[in-house]
Image: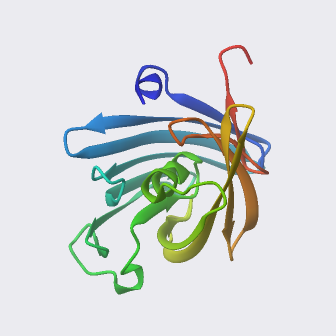
Amino acid sequence: MSSLTEHPAAWTRTDVPQGLGLGAVLPEPDGHRLEAGETVVEGEERFFTRFTVRTDLAWTTREVRAEVLSTSGPRSVTLRAQDGHWTDADGRPLPELVGCLDADVAATPLTNTLPIRRLGLRPGEHRDIAVAWIDIPCLRVRRVRQRYTRHPAEDGLERYTYRDPLHGEYRLSVDGDGVVVDYERFARRLHADA
């Protein structure tokens, strides 16, 4: 993961007229930290989001904070998790999220790294999971069922199919660190020579 620490990944959004994101996976003594931000312009809607996700060494989410700055002003949400039980910033339980081990911040492909790393699927395997999904820019939090299926590698990249009942099915290609390179109909990683 040192490559992302030294050179954060940058993505262009392919589902909106203008969108650019930047993110990094950073090692910590007791786990991992994902840091990312994104700016989107779509018609009259303009927003910037920034988020941090902290995990344990097994890639299970322990805390997520997402902030949005838009024409509605600044807003944020903070969630904490322990053993699959979630609370909000004030410590109130969130029973609808019980059993979720991952957070998925909708504005970025970076949080797909969490289940990809945590599940450790072999080619041909799939797993159904429940995640704490944070909608951007409204910051609505809900439980979403997702399926990750790993396929044989191609062109030096790992291949997955991601599916959820809200958005459908997408093909993902990821690098050796599990970080998205191409997310069908959503985002594409930018490279220095691009």
Towards the viewer: 50 or 163: 163
The residue shown at (36%, 53%) is 59
| Number of numbered discs on residues | 0
User: How is colour applied across the structure in the image?
Assistant: rainbow
Compared with 8, 86 (above or below) is below
- Is 189 placed above or below 166 here? above
Residue located at (50% from left, 70% from top): 140
Q: In which quadrant will I find the N terminus?
A: top left
Residue 29 at x, y = what percent?
19, 39
Q: Where is residue 67 in the image (x, y as percent from the top left)?
A: 43, 52
Location of the C terminus (image quadrant)? top right
Identify which residue is drawn at 68% across, 31% down.
156
Q: In the displayed structure, would residue 3 be above or below residue 184?
A: above
Provide residue 57's location: percent of width, then percent of height.
Answer: 28, 49
Which residue occupies the foreground of this view, 109 or 57? 57
Q: Which residue is drawn at 32% across and 52% down?
A: 55
Could you say which quadrant of the image residue 193 lies in?
Answer: top right
Q: Nearer the viewer, residue 129 or 77?
A: 129
Residue 94 figure quarter:
bottom left
* 184 sits to left or right of 69: right
Residue 31: percent from left, percent from top: 27, 46
Which residue ends up furthest to the bottom in the rendered image? 95
